[in-house]
Image (spheres, rainbow, N blue to C red):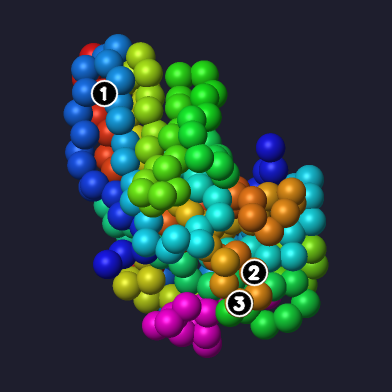
Amino acid sequence: QKEVEQNSGPLSVPEGAIASLNCTYSDRGSQSFFWYRQYSGKSPELIMSIYSNGDKEDGRFTAQLNKASQYVSLLIRDSQPSDSATYLCAVNNIRTGGFKTIFGAGTRLFVKA
Amino acid sequence: GAVVSQHPSRVICKSGTSVKIECRSLDFQATTMFWYRQFPKQSLMLMATSNEGSKATYEQGVEKDKFLINHASLTLSTLTVTSAHPEDSSFYICSARDPGGANQPQHFGDGTRLSIL
């Protein structure tokens, strides 16, 4: 079992719809959770951080965390073609000597105009 | 937010050349930086963790003598790909952890696209 799992996609949604991206993790002791967006040929860009159970909203983005289910999601409201990218879920786990960030393989999102 | 600068953005060179890539934290001190490699349409692969003032920690399967890492100051880490060959062609990306604490996210440089002819 991978430490951080994401559906590779592609996830295709029409412009204006809500895109829902999901991620599960295996380490119950995971401390913090992040979503990155990576456009083709570019490096990842941090878009959301979440540390406690519940929802966290930032503009059109909402991150949701459920530690009991070991599940974190990202909702993108009013999806735009410019949101088309690969979205990486990342989790910080405690390891000897500090925290280690584990990245999922990413979900490709395609927003159709 | 934290800014990480990576240079150069693109390198094209002949087989056998050694290539140095620089990663700088612009407005904060980073005791730890990370080096990743990403092949087309594949996921990020952590190569090594760069520790200021000490040896880098390499991931399993990454050759230490092939990928030399130097983290000589709190704002600069370098990755040197020694005697590069076509199979080393890839997208190399560095990152540094947000200075807000050990549980903070990583911020990435813009990446270096390396092409070995």
Location of residue B28 with respect to A11 vertically, above or below: below
Amino acid type assigned to the residue bearing label 3 in the image? Thr
- Report the magenta residues as a range: B58-70
The image's mark for residue A98 is 2
Q: Quadrant of the C terminus of chain A?
A: top left
- Could you tell me what secondary structure mostly forms the magenta stretch? loop
Task: Identify the element where label 2 is drawn.
Answer: strand
Which residue corresponds to the image point at 44% horizontal and 35% vertical from the top-left?
A: A64
Q: Quadrant of residue B14 in the image? A: bottom left
Task: Identify the element where label 1 is drawn.
Answer: strand
Which residue corresponds to the image point at 45% horizontal and 61% vertical from the top-left?
A: A28
Which residue corresponds to the image point at 78% horizontal and 45% vertical from the top-left?
A: B27
Q: Earlier in the sequence, mark 1 or mark 2?
A: 2
Location of residue B37 with respect to B86 vertically, above or below: above
Q: Quadrant of residue B73 in the image? A: bottom right
Magenta span includes A21: no
Residue A62 visible in the displayed image: yes
Which residue, given by chain and number where applicable, does mark 1 sit on?
A111
Q: Are marks 1 and 2 on the same chain?
A: yes
Which residue, given by chain and number where applicable, does mark 3 sit on?
A96
Amino acid type assigned to the residue bearing label 2 in the image? Gly
Q: What chain does mark 2 sit on? A: A
